[in-house]
Image (tube, helix red, strand yellow):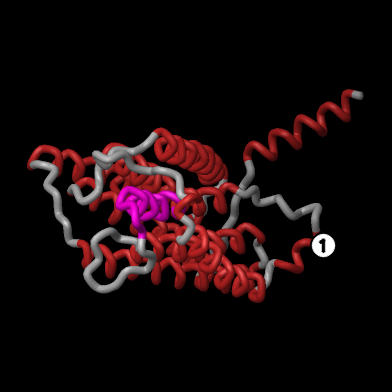
Amino acid sequence: MKTKIRFNTIALCVILLPLFVYIYLVNVGNEHSHHIDFHLFYVLGSSLIAFLLGIAAFLEFKRDKVDKIFFIALGFIGVGVFYSFHALLTPGLSLFTLIDFSDPLKETSAFVMAGDVSRLWLAFMIFIPDSLLNKRHHLKKYLNGYTLLAFAIVLPLLTYLWFSTPSLIPNFKNSDLSDTTFATLIKIATLLIIGVNTLKYYYSYKAKSNLTILSFVVGLVLIMETVILFLISKPWTSVWWLAHNLFLASYVIIGCGVIYSLLSSEKYGFFDVFGQIEQYMTLLEEKNK
């Protein structure tokens, strides 16, 4: 009991800490820091961490054969890919240019979109129901290392083709660097998906305490905070940099939960509260008939 209270307290502190940092930054002045080359290496480092977490998640999947962990591995690999493009498309890089955009606004839109898509992708992979393939056993054979490797090769190629075709890139930023309506809708969609995920894992944790599930709750809340900070900030401000740090922390915490499941006896144990209620209701209806 005391251990659970301790973990809950630590989780709450991690969730609330960004709020105090945000208040501090706003009060001292939301300064602009155009460290373009630093952003490149920082985000590339973050992408490498995402790839490593994807490998760790796949090892956990191979060990315990939990379908959801495979999709989380795909989520981390996708973050690594999209976030790498976010780094390599940084406007004004002095080192090299990945794609030569004739329109600076398109370049900024591609740069911002790559970051937003990475969060949407991870949210979607975690959103996939744990029971998705329970009645589709013929598809489970594709949950293997070959599929993961093919995904890690094909996704960067498709993403490069996407970004190298300016007509396919929607405008994510206005001339004053504020979000367009489309970019705002993408962020809101990400928030909604993550919000549903967070509720599912929160109720699972309340019904059946599991440290890996708690890491998902904390990580998902931090992603929501990240999206909100990106929504209310503009590139290169202090709050914008805070959002980068928060996103890295969010998926590292989720990844640590997966690694904990891999290395300990306490495995990923999602308890589908809503699914159980639906199952009981169906059973009750059958008995009544």
As for residue 115 lying within the magenta part, the answer is yes
Camera-side residue: 232 or 112? 112
Where's residue 221, x and y in %?
A: 40, 44
Determine whether the residue tagged by mark 1 lies in a helix, strand or loop: helix
Residue 247 shown left or right of residue 242 in the figure:
right
Name the magenta segment's main secondary structure. helix
**Residue 6 is at least partly visible in this image:** no
Task: Please name the residue shown 48% across and 57% down the image.
Answer: 165
Front position in the image: 274 or 110: 110
Q: Which residues are the magenta region?
A: 101-118
- The residue at 60%/59% (across/down) is 71
Could you say where residue 236 lies in the image, as x and y percent from the top left? 21, 51
Q: Position of residue 208 (x, y in %)?
A: 56, 47
In percent of the image, x 50 and y 49: which residue is there? Answer: 123
Q: Is residue 226 magenta?
A: no
Front-lying residue, 160 or 58: 160
Total numbered circles = 1
Q: Residue furthest front?
A: 102
Q: Where does the image place residue 156, in percent across and percent down from the top left?
A: 51, 67
Label 1 amino acid?
His
Residue 175: image quadrant is top left
Whether residue 183 is visible to the viewer of this picture, yes or no, is yes
To which quarter of the image does residue 276 belong?
A: top right
Which residue does the numbered mark 1 point to in the structure image?
Answer: 138
In the image, taking residue 240 as reference, residue 251 lies left or right, namely: right
Q: Nearer the viewer, residue 130 or 281?
A: 130
Q: Residues within 10 Å of mark 1 (few under 14, many from 20)?
A: few
| Above-or-below relation of 270 to 96 | above
Q: Residue at x 10, y 38 (%)?
A: 27
